Image (cartoon, rainbow, N blue to C red):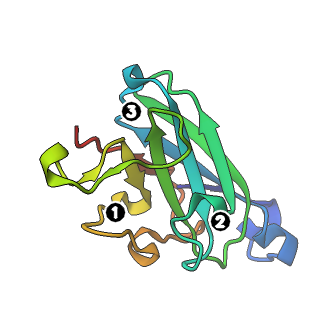
Amino acid sequence: MAVLLGLSLAVGDASAQELADASLDVVISRIDHQRGGHLIIALFDSPARWPDLSQARAIKKLAPQDIMLEIRFNGLNLDRLYAIQAIHDENDNGRLDINVLPWRGPLGPKEGVGMSNNYIPHFAPRFAPAAFSPGDTTQPLEIQLIYLK
């Protein structure tokens, strides 16, 4: 996860404004771009809002062009926890389609999905396993999409 800050934070003198000015680079990989649709990358800053897309702190919607995509979220606060959900919305209906009927294929997401920390939920996704702090590392955060069908 790449975190970009003002020079004064690098020497240990962080103001409140600098704490809220962190940027986060996110790499989405394993995108099956031939399926069409759009990628929805949603940033959450509260377990109470997770994973409702209408409650996301920020959303980026992009047409997939390749197997990998890099985006940036700006204005993050270093003392908060965040979680990211990436959805390959193949049919452009603005949500993750899920199969709940076993005779119609495997149970679970019908579209590509991935979460921060590459968390794979077995039932309803929880915020804590996907949560991260933007100040934890200097590497880009990588999210690998998973397609069940």
Q: Residue furthest left?
A: 103
C-alpha span from label 3 to label 1: 17 Å
Quadrant showing the C terminus: top left
SS category of the residue bearing label 1: loop
SS category of the residue bearing label 3: loop
SS category of the residue bearing label 2: helix
Q: Position of residue 14 (x, y in %)?
A: 80, 75
Q: Are marks 3 and 1 in contact (CB under 8 Å)?
A: no
Q: Is 9 in front, or is 54?
A: 54
Compared to residue 12, the image places residue 31 above or below, namely above
C-alpha span from label 1 to label 2: 20 Å
Residue wearing tag 1 = 119
Residue wearing tag 2 = 55
Compared to residue 87, the image places residue 74 above or below, namely below
Mark 2 or 3 closer to N-term?
A: 3
Residue wearing tag 3 = 31
Q: How packed is label 2: few (under 14 Cα within 10 Å), some, or many (20 or more)?
A: some
The amino acid type of the residue labelled 3 equals Ile
Q: Residue at x 51, y 63 (%)?
A: 137
On the image, which quarter does residue 16 sit in?
A: bottom right
Q: Is 9 in front, or is 132?
A: 132
Q: Residue at x 71, y 70 (%)?
A: 77
Residue 3 numbered mark, or none: none
Q: Position of residue 37 (x, y in %)?
A: 50, 28
Mark 3 or 1 closer to N-term?
A: 3
Task: Please indicate whether residue 148 sits to the left or right of residue 70 in the image.
Answer: left
The amino acid type of the residue labelled 1 equals Tyr
Q: Residue at x 81, y 68 (%)?
A: 18
